Amino acid sequence: QGSSIFEIILNLSVFIIFTGLLVFGALHYDGTDPVSTNYRSQFLSALFSPFGTLTRWYLSTLNGSIQNKKWEWLPVGTLLANVTAVVVSALCQALLHVTASEKYLTRSFLEAVKVGFAGSLSTVSTFAAETIGLLQALPRYFWGYYYSFGSMILGLLLGFVSYYWAVA
């Protein structure tokens, strides 16, 4: 059962209006002071967040795709989404660290990618639900510990390496 032409036109109209308002907001503020830089970053973050959400959704389709019996329990899609978000955030933060403060547009863009894209890409709620589910998988409940601690350690290591690589 498909959508009616009215639903399609309504959804497309709402999308165009709200995207236009976000683009207007991002362009309206010149970013020459901390307040307008903050507003510009917020508008740009809202424009980047759907891309992070769609990427996370795509990666979630990889969950359960490992054919090896030893690793089939691993939610690889969620792991990839969270680790990728950590790497993107670390790279953006490193680039913010080395970017001159008067490059307002560049700094707003990096902040928006970090908050909008990477923030929407990472998924704490799914990570928590999967960890709890794995902890309840008796007698193999150690999977939850492997997954949660492994995710955090991997994220920390890749975050540090990414940051150091970008700054060095």
Image (tube, rainbow, N blue to C red):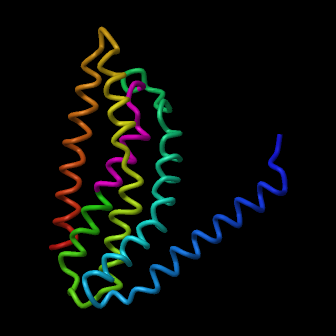
Q: Quadrant of the C terminus?
A: bottom left
User: Against 103, is 91 above or below?
Assistant: above
Of residues 60 and 114, the one nearer the viewer is 114
> Left of 69 or right of it: where is 36?
left
**In magenta segment, residue 79:** yes
Kindly indicate the quadrant of the structure image that contains residue 37: bottom left
User: Against 125, is 118 above or below?
Assistant: below
> Horizontal and vertical percent for residue 108?
34, 78
Q: Quadrant of the N terminus?
A: top right
The main secondary structure of the magenta stretch is: helix
Q: Residue at x 36, y 41 (%)?
A: 79
> Horizontal and vertical percent for residue 72?
42, 25
User: Against 156, is 14 above or below?
Assistant: below
**In magenta segment, residue 155:** no
Q: Residue at x 37, y 58 (%)?
A: 118
> Horizontal and vertical percent for residue 12?
71, 64
- Residues in magenta? 72-86
